[in-house]
Image (cartoon, grey):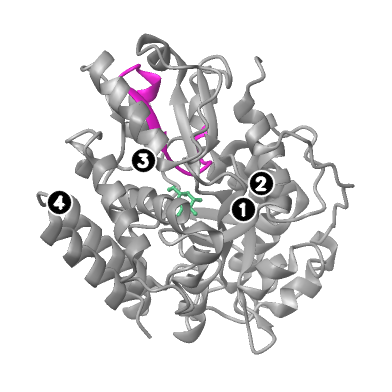
Amino acid sequence: MRRTRILAALGAAALLVGTAACGTDDESTSGSDNTGDTTSATEVEVFTWWTAGSEALGLEQLQGVLTEKYPDVEFINGGITQGGGSGKDLLQTRLAAGQPPDTFQVHAGKEAQDYIDAGQVEDVTDLYEKFGLNGVFPQDLIDMLTQDGKIYTIPSNVHRANVLWAAIPVLEAAGLPTDNAYFASVDDFIAALEKIKTATPDIVPLSVGGTWCQVHLLETILIAELGAEGYNGLFDGSTDWNGANVTTALTKFAKLMSFTNIDRDSFDWEPPMQMLLDGKAAFNVMGDWVPALLDSNDLVAGTDYLYAPSPGTEGIYDFLADSFSRTVGAPHKAGAEAWLDVISSVEGQTAFNKVKGSIPARTDIDLSSFSEYQQSAADSFKSDAIVGSIQHGAAATIQQGNATNDAVSKFTTSSMDADALAALQAALAAAYAG
Ligand code: GAL
């Protein structure tokens, strides 16, 4: 694979840490299904939005490990087809109706706190002890899942949201450099998009999906314009959502949207990414669940596609992590416990993350057989300034995320003029007030 300056920008040094597999099967004790004893588990319903492409493949890996470790446990896929967490409404409906899945995907941070506050996830501190998990995750991550000294979910992986993906043949056709897709500023990026539009009018300069993908793009622009500290301040009141730098970010977001595909609103993240593979679009900003899709199409980083921190965000890691619950009222507690054993084990996190594109949440896994991208992401995660994703629940509560999605959708389906922009900014300020 041709090395590029993009790889250097993300930091290509491998993170090599010793393996420390922790066996847990023999720790199971006897008891009934409802007491959460894994030996009596018969089935587990798992709710995620990993239903397509590389995400479904990742889930399949976990299912495989479940079958190996717990052959008597039937895996029931309660998945929904709306990626990026945009289908969480259905989960809320099931929880409210008293029909909870045994375990569900939940983002670390504000989103996890929501489920804790609502009393919908059980305290699983005992499982950290039982499965030998104390000390294997970054403490900052555990803090995002903890309340009053009790830990409520178990993390499976860490993703980076602020990544720019570029199709090399499309850049070549437009006469743009193909050895460095890193843009130091959003303005530089806009200039490149202009060039693509002029040189190759049939190509979509920046592909994007529906509302959640647009919010995802917007958060990376806020990070670029406000910097790590300014962006983090949006969530603790120290940065004013009504401020001029937020207006500038929203103005640049509107400009970026003018370079995107008009059929965007009907898509999840994969069809717009497919446009890059098909040579129909040049760039896309999306989290690092992307590489598995590219790799499964036999595309090679540095030859067929480039990746880099999204424009203006070098040195900043827009963080999100998936974790899993043992749901209050779960019909199959023992199954949920078996699942939590699987997703937290060295074996489970290795098999899953290799396919998913994320890095293991565990810090004791040897990454030398992971992709070069993943090794670089692990390195960046250790050295970059960390900020939390809005769309993916680290920085925003479910309510704030929903309000953000509503405001952005209203904006991007309008003429995006000055009045609409002012309304967007006011709606965001209201969503995060107090
Ligand atoms: C995120 C989730 C990732 C990935 C992505 C795209 O919210 O944390 O694991 O699934 O959505 O669907």
Upstream in the sequence, badge 1 or badge 2? 1
Q: Nearer the viewer, residue 331 or 189?
A: 189
Distance of label 1 from label 4 (alpha carbons)? 34 Å
What residue would you read off at disc 3?
269
Q: Quadrant of residue 200?
A: top left
Question: Please, what is the three-letter code of the amino acid marked with disc 2?
Answer: Ile
Q: How many marks?
A: 4
Q: Secondary structure at mark 2?
A: strand
Instruction: Quadrant for the N terminus, please.
Output: top right
Q: Secondary structure at mark 4?
A: loop
Q: Quadrant of residue 8?
A: top right
What residue would you read off at disc 4?
416
Residue pictured at 53% horizontal, 41% vertical: 288
What residue would you read off at disc 1?
158
Residue 410 position, x and y percent, is 16, 58
- Horizontal side of residue 101 vs 355, given as left or right: left
Question: Please, what is the three-letter code of the amino acid marked with disc 4?
Answer: Met
| Disc number lying in front (4 or 3) | 4
Local packing at callout 4 (Cα closer than 10 Å; few below 14, some 14-19, many 20+) is many
- Contact between labelled residues 4 and 1, with CB atoms less than 8 Å apart: no
- Residue 263 drawn above or below residue 122: above
- Contact between labelled residues 2 and 1, with CB atoms less than 8 Å apart: yes
Q: Secondary structure at mark 1?
A: strand
Upstream in the sequence, badge 4 or badge 3? 3
Q: Which mark is residue 359?
A: 2
Residue 174 position, x and y percent, is 35, 13
